[in-house]
Amino acid sequence: MTDGVIENGGSAAEHLRRLKGYQWYAFFVTFGGYFMAHFSRKCYSTVKEQLQDEAGYSPFILSEMDTVFMGTYAIGNIVSGKLGDTFSPTTVLSIGLFGSGACLFLINVSLWFNFVQMNITLGNFFIIGVYFLFGFFQSTGGPVGTAVMGNWFCDKASIANRGLIFGFWTCHQYCGDITAQLCSAWVLASGLPYWYALLIPSVTNFLWGFLTITLVADPVDVGIITDDVRIRMEKNAQKAASGEAVDDSGPAPISYANALRIPMVAQYAFAFGFFKLTNYVLFFWLPYFLGKNFDPVTANLIAALYSVGMMPGGIIVGYVSDLFGGRRATVIGVFMACLIVFLSIFSQDSETLGATSLLVMLCIMGILVGGPNNIITSAVAADLASHPSVKGSNKSLGTVTGLINGCGAITASIGLLAVGPLQEKFGWGSVWLFLIACTSAGTLLMTPKIFEELFPTFDDETPETEPLVAIEKSIPETEPLVAESSIPETEPLVVAESSTPQIQEPEWKDENTEPTNHPTDSSTQPQV
């Protein structure tokens, strides 16, 4: 925000006060929306064994559910981000929550009436079809929620602390994962039917959907002028001054092609794909892996430590990257290098580690995986969407976030197909080696950005200082001062009189006093 009076009523300070006053509510509602998304999908993964043993679903169908979900979730991210930039983000978020709750309820219906026992083909087709839709509804929370956060946290102080703010905000998914694991552990330990682990998130999704309807998605909707709006107003003023037609209906949503042309968007999208695969292998398969050596309740509690570690990971990466001037790629690269070390240890000893060792290692791995995953789809996406080529001209944050998250989900859904055959044929050691390769590939894709952050070019850092150097070299102020000592006292008066026209003060004053020479200056100044 800039100081002074802003068009549309109120001073800049008043607009900033109103912006700050609503930020907490936008944070709260969007945080809860993504919390519900992970609460929903994690509850399913915690009762896989019960779905197989009690409901009669085969391991193949359970694996197909994962694949179908990841496929539609990937496509849904790309589509949802664009929808959020094109239509009302509040509507898109609410539809996602209502749809997710409906899908979980339908799965409960299939379990209550035992569709698989009635007809195995009907039962399998029904649950696959529901999970096909479930992936689309679940995809709204990430890109659209990030866009809403970017809309509200756009003042200078928020941008300077963007990594830390989004680091805290992205704890939503891990809070959802942990809550789901604790909820499932409570349901199983209390003797309730296992399907309560699916019914509870179904109800909470509906409730949060009604709350989300009350969310204001963009400050402009309530008359708050942000920097992006001010930039657009200035551009419109320039167009009007040059005689061009001005459409002030708001920035147009960016196209997919133009979003991919923003520097580093494509690289981050593919790199995040490999990082997301590592995360989702642990997300989907960790309870199953631990269930081989521990009872279901203990396995879920140990697996929860991985999600616990992921929360501070995002905060640490965000804070440190803010501390070093937004050099997020470098911090992410360091975390990935450390993760490779821990995966190497797992590849050798994963099946012989005790409970205590697993708790410690999974917590640390959660920090190393969660940090980069959190920041790339939030603070990094916001950085990319605020590139000068699109700032103030296009709505791009939802589309950029959707592309990054969608490409990541596509890569993860393909990579997940390899996990089952690898662990069955070569053991879990091969799965960890597979994840090492994925992590290394993602880090290599970020190498150009890391190099750019560590070794910025001279031209990038000094374009603004070069004109000052040129001006200093062109001013010969010291030469007349040296000559004055040898000139009689009467001569400097002549020099002073002759030097006055060179300054051209009268001409400058004449230009300034003629109001007709600058008709646009007085009219455009209040708008800035």
Image (spheres, rainbow, N blue to C red):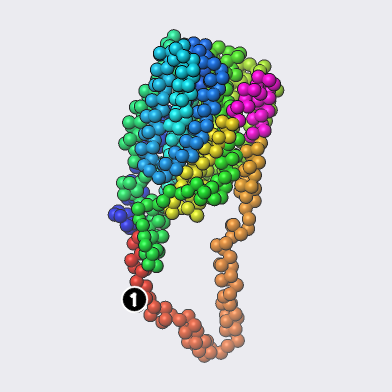
The location of residue 325, given as percent across then percent down, is: 55, 47
- Along the line of sight, the residue nearer the viewer: 174 or 165: 174
Q: Is the residue 510 above or below the residue 19 in the image?
A: below
Q: To which quarter of the image does residue 190 belong? A: top left
The type of residue carrying mark 1 is Thr
Q: Is the residue 143 above or below the residue 455 in the image?
A: above
- Along the line of sight, the residue nearer the viewer: 186 or 250: 250
Tell me where the magenta segment starts and ends, as one range: 415-439
Extreme-left residue of the structure: 9
Q: Magenta stretch containing residue 365, yes or no?
A: no
Q: Residues within 10 Å of mark 1 (few under 14, many from 20)?
A: few
Residue bearing mark 1 = 516
Q: Is residue 319 visible?
A: no
Q: To which quarter of the image does residue 63 belong? A: top right
Q: Is residue 246 visible?
A: yes
Q: Main secondary structure of the magenta part?
A: helix
Q: Dividing the image into 4 quarters, which one contains the C terminus? A: bottom left
- Along the line of sight, the residue nearer the viewer: 351 or 113: 113
The location of residue 94, given as percent across then percent down, is: 37, 34
- Along the line of sight, the residue nearer the viewer: 298 or 34: 34
The location of residue 107, given as percent across then percent down, is: 43, 20
Instruction: Kindly identify the residue that appears in the image at 65 percent across and 44 percent down.
Output: 447
Query: Would you say 444 lies left or right of 102 here?
Result: right
